[in-house]
Image: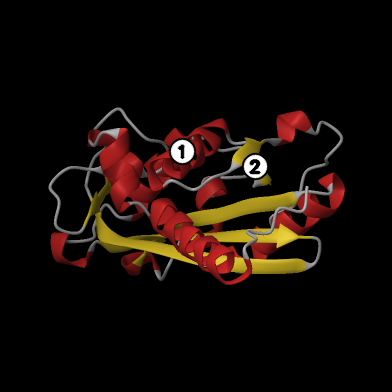
Amino acid sequence: MEIVLATKNRKKIEEIKKICETTGTDFKIYTLDDFPGCGDVEEDGETFEANAVKKAVYISKSTGMTALADDSGLEVDALNGAPGVFSARYAGPSADDRANLEKLLQEMRDVPPGERGARFVCCIAMASGDEVRTFFGYVEGVIGTEPRGENGFGYDPVFYPKGHDRSFAEMTESEKNALSHRGAALRELQKYLLKKRDTSGDIGDNS
């Protein structure tokens, strides 16, 4: 099955490719670098699902291919679910990972250990024209008080998945992918594709 990933985030692209390899999801993957004529999609939805669907539909129609779009982020209990859909721009429209992380830790400086619960959420939308399917993944955890680890990206250095004493950024790539919200969502997608193949003999390759 040929798909195009509706993102320009290189770290996210590599993570999705790695997860697809380890889950056995049989995709030939293209990126937006292969379609320079595609414009940017404004992520103005109020939910992860709305943003993922908007991106997937636009890229599918622009390329004529099945498109896979991901919208994901961090929801912190003590911040009433923030940063949520604003996770990538929490510290401002042009903020980088470090600025977002610093703002999060500043906002949580007075939050006690027992109240630092959080979760990563991922919605993956697969679109073929107007036909869309969505798949969700979640991972529960807590927010640390300082960054630890050199791997991963985004909020990984302060996120400790439930039952673990290392942050995502302290884990190996394979360890994180086995636990992550994005990995969980892609595994749900894989289940759907396998079921569709088994019932119809086709997994939706419209390329």
- C-beta proximity under 8 Å, tags 1 and 2: no
Determine whether the residue tagged by mark 2 lies in a helix, strand or loop.
loop
Q: Which residue is mark 1?
A: 15
Report the amino acid beneath label 2: Thr
In the depicted view, which residue is nearer to us: 102 or 165? 165
- Give the residue displayed 80% in from the left and 34% down from the top: 35
Q: Which residue is mark 2?
A: 7
In the depicted view, which residue is nearer to us: 200 or 56? 200
- Give the residue displayed 36% in from the left and 54% down from the top: 107
Residue 147 in the image: above or below residue 42: above
Determine whether the residue tagged by mark 1 lies in a helix, strand or loop.
helix
Residue 47 in picture, x, y percent from top left: 59, 68
Residue 79 in the image: above or below residue 168: below
Residue 101 in the image: above or below residue 132: above
Q: Is residue 104 visible?
A: yes
What is the crowding at mark 2: few (fewer than 14 residues within 10 Å), some, or many (at least 20)? Answer: many
- Give the residue displayed 78% in from the left and 47% down from the top: 207
What is the crowding at mark 1: few (fewer than 14 residues within 10 Å), some, or many (at least 20)? Answer: some
Report the amino acid beneath label 1: Glu
In this rendering, position of residue 104 left or right of residue 186? left
Residue 65 in picture, x, y percent from top left: 78, 48
In the depicted view, which residue is nearer to us: 183 or 115? 183
Q: How many marks?
A: 2
Residue 51 in picture, x, y percent from top left: 65, 61
Residue 168 in picture, x, y percent from top left: 28, 42
- Give the residue displayed 38% in from the left and 65% down from the top: 79
Q: Earlier in the sequence, mark 1 or mark 2?
A: 2
Residue 45 image-quadrant placement: bottom right
Residue 30's tag is none
Residue 116 image-quadrant placement: bottom left
